[in-house]
Image (tube, rainbow, N blue to C red):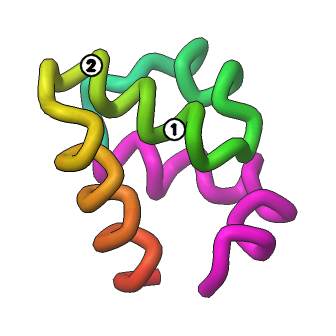
Amino acid sequence: MNWDQIEGRWKQMRGDIKSQWGRLTDDDVDQVDGQRDKLVGRVQEAYGIEREEADRQVRDWIEKL
């Protein structure tokens, strides 16, 4: 699945996102609104990790879909 598909199905992907990153709140997911960079930033903030690590986690999650 590519990011365009995820963006188009953002509301349906909420559960998967919350399962993957349990520290993200519903408000976090709403504010991301399908934007990859925002998701990386929210993951980075929620888990206190480097941006590169957050980006890697998002890439790995996309590959598993």
Q: Residues within 10 Å of mark 1 (few under 14, many from 20)?
A: many
Looking at the image, residue 8 sits to the left or right of residue 42; the answer is: right
Residue 43 vertical placement versus 18 (above, below): above
Toward the viewer: 36 or 13?
Answer: 36
Q: Amino acid at mark 2?
A: Ala
Is 13 colored magenta in this rendering? yes
| Residue 45 location, quadrant | top left
Magenta segment: 1-20
Identity of the residue drawn at 59% across and 13% down:
27
Please identify the quarter of the rendering in which residue 60 is found. Answer: bottom left
Q: How many marks?
A: 2
Residue that mark 1 sits on: 39
Q: Amino acid at mark 1?
A: Leu
Q: Is residue 53 left or right of residue 2?
A: left
Q: Secondary structure at mark 1?
A: helix
Task: Where is residue 21? Give x, y as percent.
Answer: 29, 40
63 to 52, vertically: above or below: below
Q: Residue 22, image x and y in percent?
A: 27, 34
The answer to which of 16 and 37 lies nearer the viewer is 37
Label 2 sits on residue? 46
Q: Secondary structure at mark 2?
A: helix
Q: Nearer the viewer, residue 43 or 30?
A: 43
Query: Residue at position x 57%, y 41% from top?
Result: 37
